Image (spheres, helix red, strand yellow):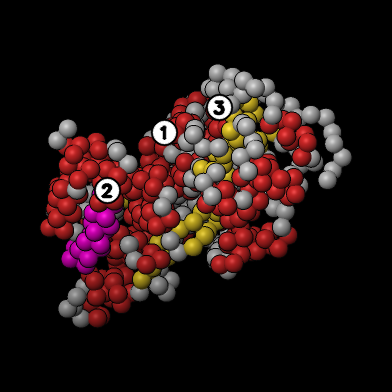
Amino acid sequence: MVRPGPALSVCARPVSNGVERRRVLDWCDATGDAAVRILCGPIGSGKTFAARQFVAASNGRAAYVRVPARTDADRLSAAIATSPALETIVLDDIDRIDAAVYAELVDAIMAREVERKLILIGRSRRRLRAESLQARGFARACSDETLAFETDEVEQLAAAYGVAFEHDDVVQLLHDTDGWALASEWLIRDAAESRRPLHDAFGHWRQQNGHLLLEFVEREGFEDAAAYEAFFNALRNGSPAAEHETTRFEQLGLPIVRTRTGLRPYRILARLAAPATTHVDIRTTTSVPPVMAVNVFGRFRCEITGQPVPFSRRRDQQVFAFVALQPECRTSRDRLLEAFWPGISHAVASQGLRTTLSRIRRAIAAAAPTVDPERYFETAGEVRVNVRTVAIDALRFVDRVEQGRIDDARGAVEGAKHHYRVAQRIYVDRVLAAEAPEPCLDRHAEQFEALYVEVLTRITELHAATGDFETAREAARSLLSCNSEEARRRALTCIAARPLATAATA
């Protein structure tokens, strides 16, 4: 045990200017009966800021304590047992204290010896013993999705800084940052300082400050040397780390996100750490090309910093969309020939494909004349859309569906509902529904529509089960409007379910 020091300072910390973390505050209110609430997430995820807003809104019933690493059990107990008027004590950085001291606190919680309600804040679920406290019914943990920034929060922040933006710019930023509050605010602040709109922000920020983010994570995010090496090797190599390593990353609170296929670092870190391309082209005047935004749901749209890519023929954009919808966004030339030139002699079809690929590259060059089109659309060997520089709505949709399935399977109902609702917003209509898609795209349209039906079904079922019958009925009505018998069957099944039927007749 360390030598006792002065008592910890307990205070209602002031809230600095910034976006209101409404979803976190709503979660705190909804879980107010829990003895312990846990805010756990990577560095820079906005835990402290949200907790300070909670304290400021508590009307003196809660207080904030940042716990120094060298805190002993007596000082910690004294801080918790302070003013009887306080209902809740927020203990920030609590996972940094001596493990034996924290173990005493957990034992006291489980023995029901702690009179105050606690909000525990830290980066490491393992050190917070979050799973143990939750499994025994003593704690509720805020989900990563609730902590992450969403559209309204980015819009509020951009407006507060006076940064011009369009809705698609906000969606793109959230995709690039995975809703990481630290990176989102940094990009917006840089755009304000350089007087740039949001859609122009990443390229300028990366050149000026991208390396600083990596250095910040390296300096602040690691205490485990082996984890540090494995994490940055995965970033530099662009390949996933071993499962046992990524599990350790998650437990240590490193900036990663869980998907159905495993854990991956935040996209923005992967892009910053990726080695520079060795290909040099005289047209490439920037080290980081601006992001290309591609929408395939409903009406096809392809833009670079707001400038439409001027595809001269419908087939060109559909070939591009077809490649973007393949596994890993890549396919062979033979597969393209089969899809778009069936039954035509190989020589004639091959010439047609070469001409089409050439037109696609020229269209990209017209929209971004200072960037090599191969940075977006690679045609040497396999044909590939580069997901490091191209943001595709279909991939965002699938990401959200996968996250929803993961939370669904884990019983994290609020997280699952959130991801499914975001997926619902992304899916505007069937793939290229406004463009008369070629037959080879029908299978993709059917697959995405099946996912959409799944999303609407789970939205209906989960919201009905938790008493939100209005949202459940809206999703059921959307199911009925889908152009498939399976969708209508699911809708009628959901509507006939007892909770929904009861609400509908109320």
Disc 2 to disc 1, how far (Cα)? 26 Å
Residue, disc 3? 53
Q: In what element is the residue under mark 2?
A: helix
Q: Does residue 278 appear in the picture of this structure?
A: no
- Above or below residue 105? Residue 29 is above
Q: What is the three-letter code of the residue carrying label 3? A: Gln
Which numbered disc, 2 or 3, marks the residue that appears first in the sequence? 3
The location of residue 461, given as percent across then percent down, is 27, 48
Instruction: Quadrant for residue 67, please give it.
Output: top right
Q: Residues within 10 Å of mark 3 (few under 14, many from 20)?
A: many
Residue shown at the point (21%, 73%) measured from the top left: 341
Which image quadrant for residue 39?
Answer: top right
Q: Is residue 353 visible in this depiction of the protein?
A: yes
Q: At 55% from the left edge and 37% from the top edge, which residue is drawn?
A: 35
| Residue 444, image x, y percentages | 25, 63
Amino acid type of the residue that numbered disc 2 sits on in the rendered structure: Glu
- 316 and 245: which is toward the camera: 245
Relative depth, front residue between 400 and 486: 486
Is residue 453 part of the magenta span, yes or no? yes
Q: Please give the name of the residue rendered at 17% of the width and 32% of the height, measured from the top-left corner.
A: 506
Which residue, given by chain and number where applicable, does mark 2 sit on? 461
Mark 1 or 3 closer to N-term?
3
Helix, strand or loop for the magenta stretch, by majority: helix
The image's mark for residue 401 is none
Q: Does residue 251 appear to the left or right of 153 in the view shown?
A: right
Foreground mark, 1 or 3, reads 3
Which residue bears the numbered disc 1? 152
Which residues lie in the magenta part? 438-456
Which residue type does callout 1 highlight? Asp
